[in-house]
Image (spheres, rainbow, N blue to C red):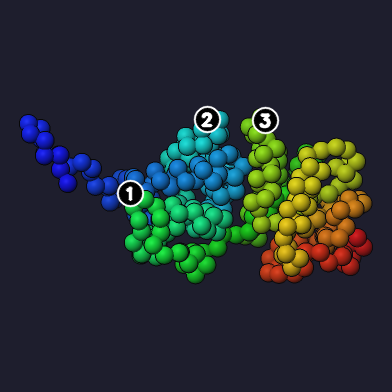
Amino acid sequence: MTTNVPGTPDFPRTAPPPVAPPAGWPAGDLPLSREDLQRFRTALAAVAPDRTSAEMLLVEIDVPRTRLPSFHSTPEHAWFEVFQTLEAGVVAQPCRRLLAAVLVRYPANPVFLDLHDRHVAGRPGDATGSPIAPARTSSLLPAPPPTVFLSHDRADQGKVQALADLLTEEGLTPWVGSEQVTGGSRRDLAVRRAVLDCDFFVPCLSAAALARPSQLHREIRIALDHADELPDHEVFIVPARLDECDPPSALQEYQGVDLFRPGGFRQLVRALRAPTPSARNRRSGPSGW
């Protein structure tokens, strides 16, 4: 449809959206137009508006933590910086992998579903972002590696970072607790979001950490509240002792592991990979919890 106003050029009212990705975008990725990329960024800024939630998505697709944005400005600007990093080729097929990761966490989001339907499943979608048919994410998109929140006291930072490195080598995605959270008054909100968004919560317990007030105790309370809402067969909390200590009474009903004993790390990896063991079996292993 055109303007058809006498004395004016006959311009179309709306220009068609671009159909090609920006020049220089990594080869082999989803062919998202500039309009699609903008919609993707806006939707990501809505579901992951802070560094904590964004990091949990981006580390799943192997974006180095050193290349993450600061989130000192608006979420939209932070995700604009993320996409500039992705365009630079820091990871292969960034949009394909990021879409897969975000759809696992937000399977009903209309923007993510529309992008998947049009560019992955080959189904046409509504230009407004509403999908014509639900995306079958379980069969068409690879599941990202499980995310593991390693809650700990700052005194145990070195041990927990070493644990995170080992879990990464095992193909898991560890997140080293609240020490990486920034944002002033939004800190507690960001930590809560991270705990609720992760696949597993591993409180790293030590005698020193349990003997003083710390963020570790607050994170454990958040995780316990969340676990009470999950089915009994779903594993979420896996306590891990770093040394000889008495776990809090609220954690003693959960099966834990002793990382300071031989075989403790392999036991933790098995727990994080097990499909559906009970999360509330009392400990009967070598630690004697």
Say which element carries label 3: helix
Residue 161 versus residue 274: which sits nearer the camera? Answer: 274
Seen at 51% across and 32% down, the residue is 74
Q: Which residue is mark 2?
A: 73
Residue 126 badge: none
Q: In whole angstroms, how far apart are the C-alphas of marks 3 and 2? A: 15 Å
Say which element carries label 1: loop
Answer with the quarter of the image where residue 266 lies.
bottom right
Q: In whole angstroms, how far apart are the C-alphas of marks 3 and 1? A: 37 Å
Q: Is residue 140 left or right of residue 162?
A: left
Q: Which residue is mark 3?
A: 185
Residue 170 versus residue 224: which sits nearer the camera? Answer: 224
The correct choice, above or below, for 281 with respect to 36 in the image is below
Q: Which residue is mark 1?
A: 33
Q: Amino acid at mark 1?
A: Ser
Q: Nearer the viewer, mark 3 or mark 2?
A: 3
Residue 7 versus residue 201: which sits nearer the camera? Answer: 7
Q: In whole angstroms, how far apart are the C-alphas of marks 1 and 2? A: 25 Å
Seen at 56% across and 50% down, the residue is 57
Answer with the quarter of the image where residue 218 lies.
top right
Q: Is residue 172 left or right of residue 31?
A: right
Q: Which label's residue is closer to the chain start, 3 or 1?
A: 1
Q: For the C terminus, which image quadrant?
A: bottom right
Asked if marks 3 and 2 touch (Cβ < 8 Å), the reply is no
Q: Amino acid at mark 3?
A: Ser
Residue 175 image offset from top left, x and y in percent: 66, 48
Residue 17 image offset from top left, x and y in percent: 27, 47
Seen at 39% across and 52% down, the residue is 129
Instruction: Judge the density around disc 1: few (<14), some (14-19), many (≥20) Cα neighbours within 10 Å.
Output: some
Q: Which label's residue is closer to the chain start, 1 or 2?
A: 1
Residue 50 image offset from top left, x and y in percent: 58, 39
